[in-house]
Amino acid sequence: MNNKYIHEREIWLVDLEPTKGVEIKKVRPCLIMRKFSNSHVIVAPLTSQKKKSEIFFNLSNISFLKKDSWVCVNQIRTIDGSRCIKRSGVLPSYKFKEIQKISGEVLKLLPKGAIAQETKRNSLSDQNNDPSLIQEE
């Protein structure tokens, strides 16, 4: 498959084998979360079985999915684009944005620019707590 046609928000059948331990296995639908290049894609696997121990986003009534499915945001991984076998369809942007938000919370990601702001805030805080800057009374 020519990977230049893979885009964010799409759901593709992806070959996730080989895997280890608790990683989701088999050829299964995956949501394309991010495409960096033709060979560098971040996906979130889908499952039709909701498990209590996993974090899910429900995708019911999606016409191109054979079953009601859940996005396993705790199983997000980077794959080679050659693992993508066949495109199933595209999620509505509002659903994709909700999944991105949940994924960011699960992965404790910060919004763009937040790291620089946090670094500056920590730097100012460190200066305020610097013992050499404390004035003696």
Image: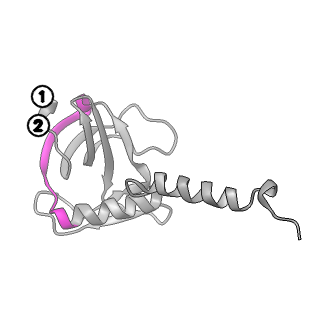
126 on left or right of 112: right
Q: Nearer the viewer, residue 5 or 25?
A: 5
Q: Residue at x 21, y 30 (%)?
A: 38
**Eyeballing the image, is 45 above or below 99?**
above
Which quadrant would residue 36 be assigned to in this image?
top left
Q: Position of residue 90 (x, y in %)?
A: 13, 54
Q: Position of residue 20 (x, y in %)?
A: 49, 36
Q: Residue at x 48, y 52 (%)?
A: 115
Q: Nearer the viewer, residue 54 or 108?
A: 108
| Residue 50 visible, this angle | no
What distance separates the C-alpha of mark 1 from that of mark 2? 7 Å
Magenta segment boundaries in residue numbering: 81-94
Dots 1, 2 in contact, CB < 8 A:
yes
**Secondary structure of the residue carrying numbered label 1:** loop
Q: Nearer the viewer, residue 29 or 9?
A: 9
Give the residue furthest to the right.
137
9 on left or right of 42: left
Which quadrant, please, contains the N terminus? top left
Q: Residue at x 48, y 66 (%)?
A: 52
- Identify residue type, mark 1: Asn
Q: Residue at x 12, y 28 (%)?
A: 2
Which quadrant, please, contains the C terminus? bottom right
**Secondary structure of the residue carrying numbered label 2:** helix
68 on left or right of 135: left
Q: Position of residue 85 (x, y in %)?
A: 18, 35
Q: Which residue is mark 2?
A: 5
Q: Which residue is mark 1?
A: 2
Whether residue 25 is in magenta: the answer is: no
User: How many residues crowd around disc 1 within 10 Å: few (fewer than 14), some, or many (20 or more)?
Assistant: few
- Identify residue type, mark 2: Tyr
